[in-house]
Image (cartoon, grey):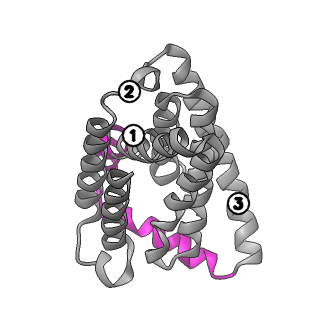
Amino acid sequence: MRALGVMLLAAFAGFFVMFSPPTKAAVPFWLMMPITTGLLAIASIFLERKNLGDVYQFRAVHMITGLLAAGCLYLVFWIGYFVSIHILPFSVSQIDSIYSIREGKNSVWIALLLVLVIAPAEEIFWRGFVQWRLSRKYGVLIGFITAAAVYALVHVGSFNLMLIAASAVCGGFWGLLFVWKKNLWPCIISHAVWDVVILILLPIK
């Protein structure tokens, strides 16, 4: 499990730099995010090269599952937004802060990065490496809970409660999808489509 520990430390460091108030202004998010997640994904595939198996086998039904899952998650966030703005007055400014990362950036370029690099890389690392490795060692339930918790914790340095909560919901949702399908493709498709819809096509704010 030493490799897992090293990889998680790298993820914590990278995400802290990208999201922490003292450092995020000094780094170009849309350059660092694909580099960080891409390197984590490449290392994950290398470390799991003997255990890839069916987890990476693509089937046409995965496209349908991923699209439906993305729609369900968007609905969850749409409901969550209207609940949060009524019970948490500070949520509006924190949500606006999340959306600020796209200001002044080319939407097509962002969409391509999300679909081709960031979403697949995050799923390969968080579900295909962290959750899968923990599940094989400690069981599916512990693997799922721990991976989802760590996925939320890497965003704690942002001091943005809404981002941390969103990460917890997403980590739990995609973690359950991975447990259900035992395949990364529904998670990758869901993650990519949801990212583009919620950040670019139909923002919730």
**Who comes first in sequence, dot 3 or dot 1?**
3
* Residue 119 vertical placement versus 77 (above, below): above
**Who comes first in sequence, dot 1 or dot 2?**
2
Q: Which residue is mark 1?
A: 124
Left or right: residue 39 versus residue 71 is left
Nearer to us in this view, 44 or 177: 44
Outermost residue, top side? 60
Counting other residues with Cα less than 10 Å from the Cα at mark 3, is it few (<14), some (14-19), or many (20 or more)? few
**Three-letter code, disc 3:** Gly
The span picked out in magenta is: 89-117
Residue 193 lies in the magenta stretch = no
Left or right: residue 29 versus residue 165 is left
Secondary structure under tag 2 reads loop
Numbered circles on residues, count: 3
Q: Which residue is mark 3?
A: 80
**Three-letter code, disc 2:** Leu
Identify which residue is drawn at 51% across, 60% down.
Answer: 150
